Image (tube, rainbow, N blue to C red):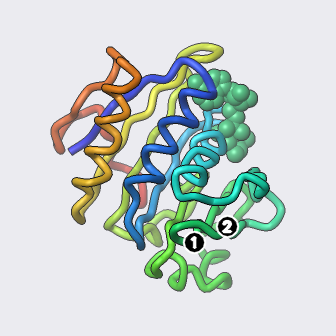
Amino acid sequence: MGIEIKTHSPDETILLGEAIGRGAGGGLVIALIGEMGSGKTKITQGIAKGLGVPEDFRVTSPTFTLINEYPGRFFLYHFDLYRISGPDDLLDLGYEEYFYGEGIVVLEWAERAKNLLPTERIDVEISILGEDHRKFVFGFRGGIFDSLASEILTFLKSQKLDSGELLDADSPKIRRDIGS
Ligand SMILES: Nc1ncnc2c1ncn2[C@@H]1O[C@H](COP(=O)(O)OP(=O)(O)OP(=O)(O)O)[C@@H](O)[C@H]1O
Ligand SMILES: [Mg+2]
């Protein structure tokens, strides 16, 4: 199954991230795919908030460190794979501890992890539609993400977003070439 949501401001994207952070269970892996400035870090800031990461932690792209760690209801491991030269860089990092651990993993430029991405994950493909306008397509892959999906749907209702849409698992809107 999938969900398509459009947001109209950075704050709305943070709210969307918060809904995800509230609904997230331990071990969740969120693969963010989207060009520069699409809002990967913004939505991660919301996820951190929803996970209860204290506000004095400033969530920024971990571009030079590859991974930032934040304490919350679960640990949040925020990766930025922009600068990796290939999936092998993740082997050196001991990625399995993170990808198959108890924390929540959020990956910017997730497609660069290729076949190291776990099969159970949520893909979030972000598109820039306009200056303040972004589209998020969630693809739920394997696993049971019901509580998360319902948090997101509650968010849609609370925001009275007319642009939210539920997608079938086989919807052509969900990209399938990520992680291969
Ligand atoms: N609806 C929106 N959602 C998210 N960000 C938005 C939105 N509208 C405008 N923006 C702006 O777009 C930018 C998104 O930046 P952000 O750092 O989150 O992108 P990114 O995808 O992490 O980029 P990078 O690949 O460089 O790390 C911010 O400047 C933000 O203010
Ligand atoms: Mg970023």
CB under 8 Å between callouts 1 and 2?
A: yes
Q: Position of residue 83 (x, y in %)?
A: 74, 58
Q: Is residue 88 left or right of residue 55?
A: left
On residue 175, the disc is none
* Between 136 and 23, the one nearer to me in the picture: 23
> Mark 1 — residue?
75
| Position of 70 relative to 36 (above/below) | below
Q: Position of residue 41 (x, y in %)?
A: 66, 45
Residue drawn where x is 43% and y is 48% of the image? 20
Work out which quarter of the rendered image holds the C terminus and state it.
bottom left
Disc 2 marks a residue whose amino acid type is Tyr
Q: Position of residue 32 (x, y in %)?
A: 52, 49
* Between 82 and 157, the one nearer to me in the picture: 157
* Between 90 and 75, the one nearer to me in the picture: 75
Local crowd size for mark 1, using a 10 Å CA cut-off: few (<14), some (14–19), many (≥20): many
Residue drawn where x is 24% and y is 33% of the image? 172
> Mark 2 — residue?
70
Q: Position of residue 170 (x, y in %)?
A: 17, 41
